[in-house]
Structures are given as structure tokens and as C-alpha cells.
Image (cartoon, rainbow, N blue to C red):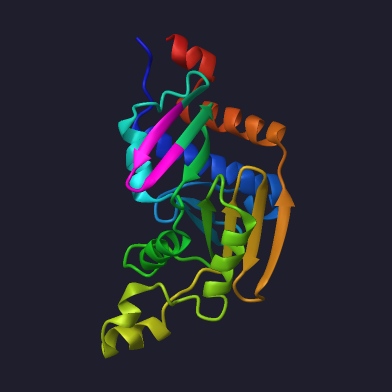
Amino acid sequence: MIRKVTSIERKKFEEERARRILLEYFPHKFIESELSERPDIINLKESVGVEVTDAQLQSVQQGLSRSGILSWEKEYESRVYAGSATVMLKERAGIHTLRAYYANTYDFSKAYGKKLMALNKEGYQRFCENDLFIFAWLADECSILSFIEEIRFDPMQFYTPCRTNKQAIAECVNGTAFDFLYLFTENSLYEYSMKNQKMNRYDIKQQQINRITEESFEAIMGMNRADFFSA
């Protein structure tokens, strides 16, 4: 019987993968980082916290979940119907390759707004630097730049309470915004500074993400994939 990866294990795997991607490009900032809760990644020495999320539409995520293909045991192709989107899925070792027809599969604004709300809630541990890491495997550069342009001059605009009443608007003015955004696609990592409004793009090779994925899986599951699925 094939061992299934639980939703909690998958969440921790994605957080560890994000941590290792950041460590790959910013070792000075993440060399002593570790997984935590609210935020997902912390470095106490550097006073940095990072929340991790996925910009994939919830309907697509639900469609992938219902398809029951989260074992990562082998490579496969499948069609998933999620609302108005028809998605071609190809995966190996937990890496999704999505092809969408008739609909976009990502909503950056919603993913960003949800985490912005979390950042400003009681119980969230804020640091000198508070960042957000967003997975968007097959998002194109145009959609990423369009999202950055949206939040460029008003990073709090997707903080829902800002648009409800006078008291909430007053609270929003004093709210905390993210300092850096990291947007990861299958071949690039985008780093955007909210303060300086500057973006850097870093290429990532398939060999790198394969290695990071292997290391992340073993770190969370305590064994490599071959041993895990043969148990």
C-alpha cells in the first residue's frame, strides 16, 4: 500500500522548500532560519519572518486535491476540472506543471490580501523585517509584473478592513505591510522590495529545484522518497 502524504506534511514540505529556495539566494539572511508558525519561517538572529502561500486559485487546488494524486510517487498526466478552468497537470516529486485553458489559475491579489490580514492579526509574531513568499509555478512574468504594479503605491489596498468603516481605515493607516515579496515560478525567483520599489529576478535551474525538493522532502519526512514509498 502506497504511503500517502498528509495535508500537514505537504504544508510543511512547501514551507521547507520555500525556506531552502530563499537560503539558496540569500544565505546571509536565511542561514539560521527555521520553520515556525505565524510566520512560517523565522530567523531570530536577523529578526526576519516569512509567511508562505500559494497564489493558485482555490477551485484549482480543490480540483487537484479531489483528483487524489498527491503521493508524488511517479510522474503522470491528468486533467482536472476546476470551475471554468481546465488544467493539464504533470507532476514529479511534488512539482506541479499546470496548463490552464479558458481561465487563469492564479489570484495574486487574493493570496496577498489574505496573508496581509494574517500579518496584522493578534498572535502573529512580527519582526524587524516581515516578508511574504508566494508559489506560482506557471505564472508568466506579465501577470507577476501586473500584480506588483497593483500594490506598488498602495501595499495595504488588499487589507480588507481598510475598505469597511472609518475605524478600520484608521487602523489600516497604522497597519504593518510586508517588507519583501518573493514570487517563485518554475524557473525564476522574483524579489520585490516594498520600500525601495525595486525588483530583482533570479534564474533557477531545474537541477537546483530538483535538489531542493529532494532535500526538503527528506527534512520533513525523515527519509528519501524511495524509502518513504517503499515502506
Report the residue at 63% width, 51% height from top. 30
Query: Is residue 21 at all visible to an observer of this figure?
Result: yes
The quadrant of the picture occupied by the N terminus is top left
Relative to 199, is 217 on the left or the right? left
Label total for image: 0
Query: Is residue 94 at all visible to an observer of this figure?
Result: no
Vertical comparison of 23 with 211: above or below: below
Residue 153, given in percent of the width and then of the height, sits at: 55, 81
Between residue 5 and residue 120, name the one nearer to us.
5
Vertical comparison of 214 with 197: above or below: above
Between residue 168 and residue 160, name the one nearer to us.
160
Residue 35, given in percent of the width and then of the height, sits at: 48, 45
| Image quadrant assignment for residue 166 | bottom left
- Magenta residues (range): 78-87
Residue 144, given in percent of the width and then of the height, sits at: 58, 60
Residue found farthest to the front: 102
- Does the magenta run of residues contain 85? yes
Magenta region, main secondary structure: strand
Relative to 81, is 207 on the left or the right? right
Residue 177, given in percent of the width and then of the height, sits at: 48, 73
The quadrant of the picture occupied by the C terminus is top left
Report the residue at 47% width, 60% height from top. 108
Relative to 5, is 144 on the left or the right? right
| Image quadrant assignment for residue 170 | bottom left
Vertical comparison of 118 with 27: above or below: below
Report the residue at 45% width, 66% height from top. 126
Report the residue at 65% width, 60% height from top. 191
- Does the magenta run of residues contain 26? no
